[in-house]
Amino acid sequence: MRKENNMFQQYLEEYGEGLVGAIGKIDPIQFGQAAGLLKQAYLEDKQVIVLGNGGSAGTANHFVCDFGKNAVKEPDMRRFRILSICDNVEKITALGNDIAFSEIFREQLVNLMNEGDVLLAISASGNSPDVLRACEYGREHGAHVIALTGFDGGKLAGIAEVNMTARLSSYEQVEDIHMIVTHMIVNFFKGNPEYLRQ
């Protein structure tokens, strides 16, 4: 039993140390640029469109909830215009079945996206074809792309205007960091209302 307890203790310490180390490596310049693009979208009344697959879709939807509700708390200020394009299973499966699963996000952007909108793309690998296709479409049509990636950033890191990579080798830990980063973004705007008035 003592040997097992030591094994679990070591595992928990290593997992936590990995997360703390990755948080410490978040680039403040990239974080600031992401905040700047979101501020610009707010001031210009543009949309923030969020996307991701699997666990990243869960993070995207969670961020839409938190950012849309909590980022602006001042009673005299409107909230962000934010939406997820990975929250409608009927639409996603119809597009995937009738066109191609690599097009499930791009096809929605054709209907929804305007020049100057911000795409926030979340992909642990940075290589998901549907995410890449959407971001390529966004850049070609005047959107700003913010990416949250993992591992080495993948192809998405090269497409995005701003990229924050969780340089870890575990999908679970990468997704943990992505959730933390999205919470940090919400908390930054919530705690600094004057930033949107400048």
Image (cartoon, rainbow, N blue to C red):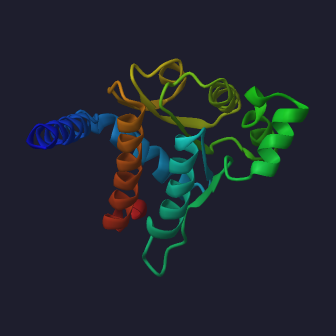
- Image x and y of residue 109, in percent: 74, 40
Residue in the image at 42% along x and 40% along y: 175
Residue 21 against residue 84 in the figure, above or below? above
- Image x and y of residue 116, in percent: 63, 43
Query: Relative to 110, is 198 on the left or the right?
Result: left
Query: Relative to 185, is 156 on the left or the right?
Result: right
Quadrant the C terminus occupies: bottom left
Quadrant the N terminus occupies: top left
Residue in the image at 40% along x and 37% along y: 172
Residue 35 against residue 166 in the figure, above or below? below
- Image x and y of residue 186, in percent: 40, 58
Residue 92 against residue 106 in the figure, above or below? below
Residue 102 against residue 66 in the figure, above or below? above
Residue in the image at 72% along x and 44% along y: 113
Exactly how many numbered labels are in the figure? 0
Quarter where residue 10 is shown? top left
Query: Relative to 97, is 131 on the left or the right?
Result: left
Query: Which residue is at the far right?
Result: 98
Residue in the image at 68% along x and 31% along y: 134
Q: Nearer the viewer, residue 17 or 62?
A: 17
Q: Nearer the viewer, residue 142 or 109?
A: 109
- Image x and y of residue 85, in percent: 68, 47
Query: Which residue is at the far bottom?
Result: 75
